[in-house]
Image: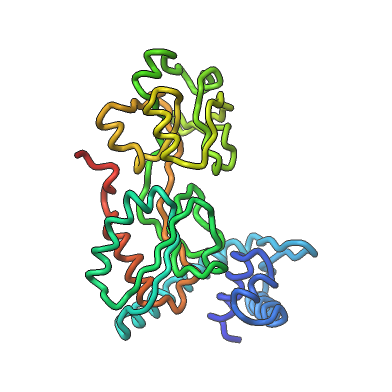
């Protein structure tokens, strides 16, 4: 038995949520996937997966092995990618999908720098707030803003952005500031339509305890810039990521609310299909972006 291949197949079954999906991802047959998992279980002398007609789930032993297997596969893939990157120069088209506002404000200034460093790479940038399947739609790399990461792709964290509840001084002069999260039910708020529960907001206190509240709705939108504009005009309360409103907070045109409470942070992630056989151009771009956002990202810096 090829144990490294068996670990790869087992990890694919878990990450893809089934044998058939793992087979598609690995370009092999479901029968081969089943064989590898069965041989691995026989070799280890323990069941790794609970199988039903509709789903698979990890056993306790499977959970322990999955974390170690992912670590081993990541180490091997990193070594292969490093060798590939050093053996062949980066060239060809690199298709990247990214969120609209973040792409315009914080990625667009970086592209010329990358182009100057790697003149043989042709960039193809698509900006949209719709969540796309990067493999199905032919992208090499996706930039995502997420709290939970991704179960379907390899992800590398590039930066963190705070989510901040805020309003303009004009709104506060007219309506006052909410005293606690529950008071938001009596205020006019901007609802972000792409959120999992748009009108239910989650707050954490200083001890990390979670409070969920249903807020009053004044406007619903799928655009962060629209939410920002309405808040700046003094018409509503909103929460927005610091990468969008950092300058407004520093200028005092938006004021943070509810001291003692905070919204969960979000991560800026680079997503790609697999660490194995990672192309030089993708690896170089991910490293380039990670370096650009190293330390305090631009939206958290003064000035």
Query: How has the structure been colored for display?
Result: rainbow
Q: Nearer the viewer, residue 249 or 95?
A: 95
The residue under the point 42% across, 75% down is 278
Q: Nearer the viewer, residue 210 or 243?
A: 243
Specify the quadrant that holds the C terminus.
top left
Q: Is residue 148 left or right of residue 92?
A: right
Specify the quadrant that holds the N terminus.
bottom right
Where is residue 148? Give x, y as percent. 51, 50
| Vertical order, 207 against 242 (above or below) | above
Where is residue 185? Give x, y as percent. 56, 21
Give the residue furthest to the left.
303
Q: Nearer the viewer, residue 131 or 53?
A: 131
The residue under the point 26% across, 73% down is 118
Q: Is residue 293 left or right of residue 149?
A: left
| Residue 206 seen in the current view | no
Where on the picture, by quarter, is residue 281?
Answer: bottom left
Where is residue 229? Give x, y as percent. 40, 33
The residue under the point 40% across, 19% down is 171
| Residue 82 seen in the current view | yes
The residue under the point 64% across, 75% down is 24
Where is residue 45? Give x, y as percent. 67, 74
């Amino acid at each position: 038995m090829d144990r490294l291949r068996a670990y790869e197949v087992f990890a694919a079954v878990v990450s893809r949520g089934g044998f058939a999906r793992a087979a598609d991802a690995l370009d092999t047959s479901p029968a081969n996937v089943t064989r590898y998992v069965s041989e691995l279980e026989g070799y280890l002398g323990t069941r790794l997966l609970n199988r039903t007609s509709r789903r698979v789930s990890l056993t306790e032993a499977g959970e322990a092995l999955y974390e170690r297997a992912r670590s081993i596969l990541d180490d091997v893939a990193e070594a292969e990618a490093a060798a590939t990157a050093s053996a062949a120069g980066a060239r060809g088209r690199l298709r990247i999908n990214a969120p609209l506002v973040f792409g315009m404000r914080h990625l667009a200034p970086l592209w010329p720098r990358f182009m100057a460093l790697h003149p043989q790479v042709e960039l193809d940038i698509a900006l949209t707030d719709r969540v796309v399947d990067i493999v199905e739609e032919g992208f090499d790399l996706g930039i995502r803003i997420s709290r939970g990461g991704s179960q379907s792709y390899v992800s590398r964290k590039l930066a963190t952005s705070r989510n901040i509840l805020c309003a303009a001084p004009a709104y506060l002069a007219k309506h006052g500031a909410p005293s606690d999260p529950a008071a938001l039910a009596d205020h006019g708020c901007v609802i972000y339509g792409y959120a999992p529960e748009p009108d239910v907001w989650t707050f954490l206190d200083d001890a990390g305890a979670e409070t969920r509240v249903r807020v009053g709705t004044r406007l619903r939108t799928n655009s962060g810039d629209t939410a920002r504009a309405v808040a700046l005009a003094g018409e509503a309360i909103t929460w927005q990521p610091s990468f969008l409103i950092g300058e407004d907070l520093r200028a005092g045109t938006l004021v943070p609310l509810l001291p003692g409470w905070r919204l969960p942070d979000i991560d800026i992630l680079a997503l790609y299909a697999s660490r194995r056989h990672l192309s030089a151009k993708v690896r170089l771009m991910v490293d380039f972006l990670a370096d650009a956002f190293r330390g305090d990202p631009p939206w958290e810096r003064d000035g």
